[in-house]
Image (spheres, coloured by chain):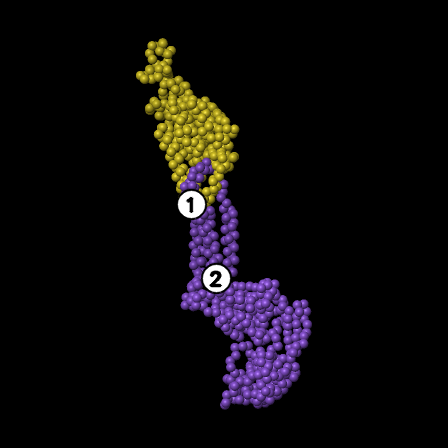
Amino acid sequence: MAALLLDAPAWLALLALPLALAWWTARSAVAPDEPTGALELWRAAQLEAPHAARGAWRWSPRTVFALAGLVAACLALARPVWRPRSGPVVWRVIVDARAALGLPAPTELDVRAASQTRAQRVLALAAGALERVLEQGDRVEWRLVSGEHVLATSSMLPSDWPPLDEQRCGHSAPTWERYDELGTLWVTDCGAALEPRHAGLAASGAAPTPGVVTRWPGRAVEWNGSASVELDEPAPLVALALDARRGPLGRALAAWCSARGASLCDPATCGDAAALRIEFATLDADERGAGARAGWRLAGRFGALAPSARPHSVLLAEDGPRARPLLRVERGRVESALEPDAELSGDGAAFAVSCAEAFDRALLPIAPVVALDERQRSEFPREIAPRRPADPNAPPRPLVEWCAAAAAVLAICAAALRR
Amino acid sequence: MSAPVDPTSAAVVLGAAYAERVRRFAAAFAAQRARASSTSGAARRAGGGDELVGHRPLRAGEDARDLDVELYARLERPFVRERRAEAGERWAIALDTSRSMGVGAPSKLQLAAEAAGALAACGLRSGARVELCALGGAGGVEIEVCSRAIEWARCARWLEARSAAAVGSSSALLAHPRWLAARRVFVLGDLFDLEPAQVLTLARCGRVVAALAVLAPNELAPPRSGAVVWRDPETQARAPVALSPAVVELYRAALQARLDAWAGAFARRGQAFAVAASQSPFEDAVRGVLSA
């Protein structure tokens, strides 16, 4: 669809000037009362005149030219751009991965939506907004995003986003500016502070929602709407294969579990309930790897870790220029590229401390946690329609020069015309 | 000349300079008439006027009522009294003082009054008895009569006392019986409320009738754009008009047709008709109506 877009729409506020001038001119252009002895001749002339001539413009041409010139000047300042009709478009929907989207949708704003989560409501809003702009051949790509990380993608409406596991991960909001493009729709719960220049926006709105605001093994703090209270919680489960518990990583994990009050379990039995998983890569037969950090060193047979698009950090990297990750930490998971029985050398205590810090970072809460300020937030739903991107094969044509030229010509005409 | 704009306050102001202009104009008119009479003799005729110029033998076909019986008794020859044409004539000048005459800057009444004063001066200079008539404020007819040139100042004062505030139509003014005794009748006004036939009914029995249509600038050349609410000062009726070129052209055509109708009707009867803009000098306007 071809479209006229404005690169600096704020300048359109100056349109108030010609509008005010037009209003003032219209007021002052009240027809003057003039005496004449030839009233009957005027009446006859008006009756005989063509209908179009009878309703002639009341403003003088000079005024019309001046007003049109001002409007053209305002348009020029707003930097209009003509974007030709584009072909099929892949619409990108950036879905906020924060746990707050799993909270109930504000009930006071829409009673029917009382059983919905904010995510369900805003995804329905987004689907409606897209339906209004979709054309034949268009596709939609849904992306669950945290910061700059795309956690998941879908070509169908992901009505179960964000998944519970992702909510437990405590993801941050997407880096919205990175996705401020035409053909993009931002989906979140709180959009009042967001001002996309090119992207569309769908925000579910928010209302204060009591619940857990922080968790640590065995304890939680819940905000009940007016105050925070501390609660007991079950100990978290940490999944580690039985045959890996003898190695240095397994021993460090066991020490950390006893210190934190967590329980070790077999991955096959604890399933999704595990708050932390220690996983080992499939080893290559004849590859070895070694890396050192903070006074300790780990070496053993090596198996490459699968690339991860999720937020993660590397606890230990291979020595040398290749620097392949040997120990990788992400929320809910610690991955080792070395065999479970890798050889630890150097400072064993430093190794235990490094591992404990990594386990603390990676340990998931047993249920999603939403920060207190997010639970207390109150906002109305908001929607900005997404706009179709330009066709890269048909570059946009700036119209600034044309508008400026029109303004100049109109101004000259206004100056040249008799009042 | 003053420039009244508001019809309700439009009055006539005749200054000292005006009196001088009128004097020169009347002198020029008299001189022109004298030259014309000396060459054609047409100005002299038997009977009609009041001023006796002399006697001459009766010509065949002449009205025997002018025969000087006493002279015939003494001389036994028929002589007729010879009189000057204007001598003893009555000039009637009808001045439209209706509210519509207040339109224009200067007002139409200002020029009509100046023309009336000049006509009065010409008439008095020619020995005619001048009667100035206008509608009064109460709808009646107000008349001022001057018989001698020295009385012209009284005519001027009477004219200065006029204002465009009269109620009633010009046709009521023309219906006054005084016109029947006049040899020359001048009708001065915008003539929008009259038809040529109403004025030309006076052009009988050798009576000379002249009409001067005085129009305001915005009546002769209205603006070609914008919007205006035209108002009739007499009826207060209003007509909002968007001044497009098409509408203005239609108006001008209608006005021209009306003026052409007046001019054609007067020309067919050998009478004088002139049109003047209210801001034009009275000399031009008066020359037009004295041409008959």
**Residue B206 pos. (x, y %):** 37, 23
Badge 2 and badge 1 both on one subunit: yes
Above or below for A116 versus A344: above
A157 or A336: which is nearer to us?
Answer: A157
Colour assigned to chain B in the rendering is yellow
Name the image quarter holding residue A107: bottom right
Above or below for B201 versus A251: above
Give the mark nearer the N terminus: 2 vs 1. 2
**Residue A372 pos. (x, y %):** 63, 70
Colour assigned to chain A in the rendering is purple
Q: Secondary structure at mark 2?
A: strand
Q: Residue at x 57, y 79 (%)?
A: A330
B84 or A281: which is nearer to us?
Answer: A281
* Residue B2 can be seen in this image: no
Q: Which amino acid does the dot numbered 2 rest on?
A: Leu
Q: CA distance from mark 2 to mark 1?
A: 39 Å
Give the crowd class for mark 2: few <14, some 14-19, many >=20 residues within 10 Å.
many
A382 or B271: which is nearer to us?
Answer: A382
Q: Residue at x 47, y 33 (%)?
A: B109
**Residue B226 pos. (x, y %):** 46, 45
A149 or A154: which is nearer to us?
Answer: A154
**Residue A416 pos. (x, y %):** 43, 50
Which numbered circle lies on residue A21?
none
Which numbered circle lies on residue A51?
1
Q: Which residue is mark 2?
A: A6
Above or below for B172 versus A130: above
Q: Is residue A163 left or right of residue A75?
A: right
